[in-house]
Amino acid sequence: MNDSLYTPCRLCPRQCATDRRAGVPGVCGETAELRIASYGSHVGEEPCLSGTRGSGTLFFSGCACHCFFCQNWQISNADSTGQPTSEEQFHQMALDLITKGVHNLNFVTPDHFWPHIEALCARLRAEGVTIPFLFNSSGYQRPVMISRYATQMDIFLPDFKFADPQIAHAVMGDERYPEITLEALRLMIAEKGFLEPFDPTGITPAQRGVLVRHLVLPGHIDNTLRALDVLHQEFGRWLPLSLMSQYTPVPATHQRPPFDRRLTAQEYQTALDHAQALEFENLLIQPLANSDDFLPDFERAHPFKGNP
């Protein structure tokens, strides 16, 4: 593994330049010691990724975004949970998932541990592994890194969280999120194209391409309408898009209205109506959350109750 990218670390847009190899945590909260919070077969992703046998998710500790409403807050913030993991253990985790028949290996919040992931993917390909590798991210990636990710990754699953710089600043402390993420999306799509096949039934899982996610936020429907307009203007109506309704309040949101409540049916319907008016053709939608089956609890051995 080439771990020189950890010193000084400029893997994410924060570019904190810490010496993570020397044990100094970056803005992501992590040193150069790989930490895995959870791994397993997951059926809670979009059907074209989960398919019929699940997506092989590997959740990493830490994150450079620090969105206060993060549903993965137990693992994404400074005092996050997670187990130190050697390169050999990481390799074995991937092989365990592959043996279970997952449709892809799904690296969740991967950018701050990219040197480890890059080495693992190259090794697995050399060993004859052919299933797709999936980069599941916030969208908040350094554009200069996208071509390097694309060398190993088959599928990009980025968020486009904020079209409004003021909301981005309030939630994650960086008003540059919209411009940085939009440029990253342009490069991801230039490298891999749109997700294919796009099969909402999951019978034929995706093999390559980009699917963009947007989570509708309570009390901020204008952010969603603006995000949809931007995505349509940039990429057109054939962009594969997952319009998510699953927002769930977490402890850090309890004193931060309107983030302290769930999305209303009317808010989500307004978002859906706008997406349909823009004639997005490859649109995945969600029913409003009526259970917490796919709200993770990383203190459990199996974080998602909805998984078989």
Image (spheres, rainbow, N blue to C red):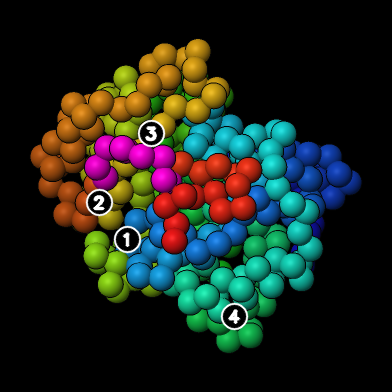
Give how far across and how far down residue 79 sits, in percent. Answer: 72, 34
Give how far across and how far down residue 186 sits, in percent. Answer: 39, 51
Residue under numbered circle 4 = 125
| Mark 2 and mark 4: Cα distance apart in space | 31 Å
Amino acid bearing label 3: Tyr
Element type at marker 1? helix
Give how far across and how far down residue 245 sits, in percent. Answer: 31, 37
| Mark 3 and mark 4: Cα distance apart in space | 36 Å
Q: Earlier in the sequence, mark 3 or mark 2?
A: 3
Against 2, residue 297 (above or below) is: above
How many numbered marks appear? 4
The magenta stretch spans which residues? 286-294
116 or 96: which is nearer to us?
A: 96
Residue under numbered circle 3 = 247
Label 2 or label 1, whichever lies nearer to me, is 1
Residue under numbered circle 1 = 47
| Mark 3 and mark 1: Cα distance apart in space | 19 Å
Label 3 or label 4, whichever lies nearer to me, is 3
Q: Are marks 2 and 1 in contact (CB under 8 Å)?
A: yes
| Mark 4 and mark 1: Cα distance apart in space | 25 Å
Element type at marker 4? helix
Residue under numbered circle 2 = 284
Q: Earlier in the sequence, mark 2 or mark 1?
A: 1
**Figure quadrant of the C terminus:** bottom left
Q: Is residue 305 left or right of residue 85?
A: left
Amino acid bearing label 4: Arg
Q: Earlier in the sequence, mark 4 or mark 1?
A: 1
Label 4 or label 1, whichever lies nearer to me, is 1
Amino acid bearing label 1: Pro
Amino acid bearing label 2: Leu
Against 9, residue 167 (above or below) is: above
